[in-house]
Image (spheres, rainbow, N blue to C red):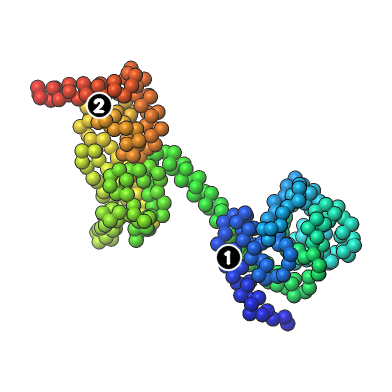
Amino acid sequence: MTHLAYKELLALSEMTASLYETEGSVQFGERLVTQLSRLIGGDIYSYNEVDSRTQRSIAQWAPSSVTMIPDGLEILGRHADENPIVPYFKQSGDGRAMMISDFLTQREFRERPLYQEFYKPFRIPYHLAIALFIQGSSTITTIVHRGRREFNERDRLLLNLARPHLLQAYRQSQLRATLQHQLRSQQIALDSLNMGLLAATPKGRIMWMTEPCGRMLQHWGLAPGRGRLPGTLFEWARADDACRARLDQSAEAPIPFVRTDARGTLRITKLVVAPPWMFVVEATAPTSSLETLKALGLSKRETEILSWVARGKTNPEIGAILGISPRTVHKHLGRIYMRLGIENRHAAMALVMEIMRRGESVKNQG
């Protein structure tokens, strides 16, 4: 029975631990080819994704001093199945470590176009390979290449011992990349809705928040510090949890965090009682202004924007208050001008001032 030396066990452990931290094929491949040299001696280490049907090939290699030959990836994709190891992986489904010498003599291999056009310029006739993925015409392999001496059975054993860990690390890396892509897509979708949303742990650490949320909190003096909820918001959320636990009112409507001043009203509602906390953040203009401007027949958002325009706010300032982008404010203003039959910001301010003056006059007469 073969026993591994301590340094071999350590190299295997550290390599797999490093690979478990990767995200996606590119990062996984880069990390693998640099770490594999600690386990098995070789001249070049490669990570290869090859589709023999489409002749598409992606390769990463180490050391970084190695320069790919012109049209190298195209050549590799075109002649991939001339490497006897690849057809074996596809036909058998067995991805364990194999050498060229398991199938061909060195003379036979060196006569093949794959060697003459691709491997000969690198002077690497000896290969030890494992498969990480086999499906149809697609394979993902990791290969250790040497130029002067053949691999031995101990090299094969080391790579076979590493393979189950590499397979698991590869799958985890792919899963992490998929989840991150989904999260980024959801974040973009939420931002496009101009909604102020925020998720945080019960210890106050912010997990994520939309850009509109960040703008509103910043404007109202509640900007997160070092990725944590501001103190007043954190204490309110904790008190709300404690109240629900004490009174068993989890089914009741949530008690919002409200801040009102001359700028209008900031309203934060906690949607999810159980961890993680989820907050909806909304900001509105002063009620008196909105009520007076309702007669213009604008939408709620258009009325809010017009109210802030009348107070001299710029598009970026209005965007920060309402949690929308300056470009969105600009688009709303274009529709407001068209609906009210006016041409610019100054005309809008004059119109609002006149409406407010009339409202105050009617109120005083009453």
> Which mark, residue 125?
none
> Which mark, residue 18?
1
329 above or below 6?
above
Relative to residue 26, is residue 50 drawn left or right?
A: right
Task: Determine the residue positioned at 79% across, 64% down.
Answer: 147
218 above or below 337?
below
Q: Nearer the viewer, residue 51 or 316?
A: 316
**Position of residue 99 measured from the top left corner of the image (x, y, whole percent):** 80, 66
Neighbours of disc 2 within 10 Å: few (<14), some (14-19), many (20+): many
Give the spatial CA distance, label 2 vs label 1: 61 Å
Q: Is residue 15 visible?
A: yes
Outermost top residue: 341
Dot 2 falls on a residue whose secondary structure is helix
Q: Amino acid at mark 2?
A: Leu
User: Which image quarter is the C terminus in?
Assistant: top left
Tally the marks.
Answer: 2
**Position of residue 157 measured from the top left corner of the image (x, y, whole percent):** 73, 73
Outermost left residue: 365
Task: Determine the residue positioned at 76% across, 63% down.
Answer: 145
Task: Determine the residue positioned at 28% across, 37% down.
Answer: 284
Q: Is residue 129 visible?
A: no
339 above or below 172?
above
- The residue that mark 2 highlights is 293
Viewer-nearest of discs 2 and 1 = 1
**Position of residue 258 measured from the top left corner of the image (x, y, whole percent):** 24, 46
Give residue 5's quadrant in the image: bottom right
Query: Which badge, 2 or 1, comes first in the chain's sequence?
Result: 1
